[in-house]
Image (tube, rainbow, N blue to C red):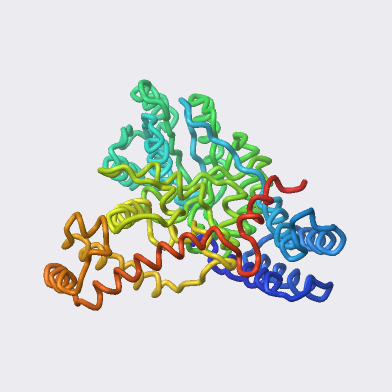
Amino acid sequence: MVLDNLGGSLRGALKKIASASRLDKPLVEEAVREIQRALLQADVNVKLVMNLSDRIRERALDEKPPAGMNPREHVINIVYQELINLVGKSSEVALKKQTIMLVGLQGSGKTTTAAKLATFFQRKGLRTAVICADTFRAGAYDQLKALCERQGIFFYGDKGNPDAPAVATAGLEAARRYDVKIVDTAGRHALESDLIQEMEDIHKVVQAEQKLLVMDAALGQQASEQARAFNQAIGITGVIITKLDGTAKGGGALSAVAETRSSVAFIGVGETPNDLERFEADRFISRLLGMGDIKTLVERAQEVQVDEEVDVESIMRGKFSLKDMYKQMEAMNKMGPLKQILQMLPMGGLGIELSDKEYQITKDRLDRYRVIMDSMTDSELEDPKIITANRIKRISLGSGTSPELVRELLKSHTAMQKAIKGMRGGMGKMNMKRLMKRMGQPKG
């Protein structure tokens, strides 16, 4: 997941508050120290961490909880709000006709991000084109062309032409009938004068509505200098942070965005074409703290094309047959890696901690469940209660599995109904639903 280590450390600090019998100054101080340690290890700027710590401490000790919220819930709400303030507002890139220019240093993931961004807009129903104006890196043309062809996205490039502004101009003309035109520009190993000049020249001919800086999350606090230089050259309108799924330093990149006087527009959370998410601070922090991200989950579900309509609400109601369960599993499989999907669900407490091995075991088990359900009749899928011992034997033979695994599936189905209903219940001793309702706009 995004910033696994940071999320685990923050959840650990908040769990102490959630499970405490009473809230006092020593407990608040201990929690603040753990939050400080977690953020510093994630390479967040020291000054920002100290300011955040002071605000959490002051508010936790001085503010009175609002009506209907106990002191523990109130402190967790304060941490949630202050973390949102730390990462800043989101940069809204509208779903409309526009030209987008991508800039960044070589190795930031800019080329793959161009294809991911095109895929994002394509999933939203917009006709998208990608123009390769990176004439510096030899493999850029072939890499981007292959990525776009794989996703069915219009691609334009002029291999061997060193005139990047001319390539960009010709590409815009070739893609004039498309809604969203994404211009990928060259990167360098460092911010050299020729790179800055080429960016400025392309910017003059492209006249992009959005100029997005692509930054590698592993840069940490070094991202500040990079962000400042790109912003001075062309005026950055938003930032895309890549590789947030595999770095401990992502906090530094997130907090460095202030240098552009803009905000984060998207985050890269994996290697597949669909692993680019619109950044929204409240969703990001909610998932980081293990409180789920139902909004993103629903959006992903709405983008999934399945043969039969998937009732997303049934995920939370828990009222579904084995056939419904099968459809949900198929939809989840299309929505992305199981680990990402499960972490969008509010699983109670402050998140369920599963290792990569445990996630793989869970995925393998779900794959075997699908094979078992393929061996069931429609009536059995609609009403699992009719599945007798003889039916279990027939299903196990047909699926090449054991009767024990078939019984396990039936038990899992029953348990899933109960568990999903319970997701809307308390967060340990606390009322998750009530807490999340109160987590509205962060204080300034």
Taking 128 as reference, is 83 left or right?
Answer: right
Q: Which residue is located at x 49 percent, y 58 percent?
A: 345
Q: Which residue is located at x 57 percent, y 61 percent?
A: 425
Taking 37 as reference, is 148 left or right?
Answer: left
Residue 13, position as x, y percentages in the image: 67, 71
Note whether 404 is above or below 5 in the view shown: below
Residue 364 visible, this angle: no
Residue in the foreground of this view, choosing between 409 and 339: 409
Note whether 193 is above or below 350 in the view shown: above
Note whether 317 is above or below 34 in the view shown: above
Residue 143, position as x, y percentages in the image: 32, 46
Taking 238 as reference, is 51 left or right?
Answer: right
Q: Quadrant of residue 389?
A: bottom left
Seen as rendered, the residue at the extreme right is 62
Residue 319, position as x, y percentages in the image: 39, 55
Residue in the foreground of this view, choosing between 389 and 289: 389
Q: Which residue is located at x 49 percent, y 24 percent?
A: 205
Count the marks: 0
Q: Quadrant of residue 250?
A: bottom right
Residue in the foreground of this view, choosing between 123 and 365: 365
Residue 3 visible, this angle: yes
Residue 42, position as x, y percentages in the image: 62, 65
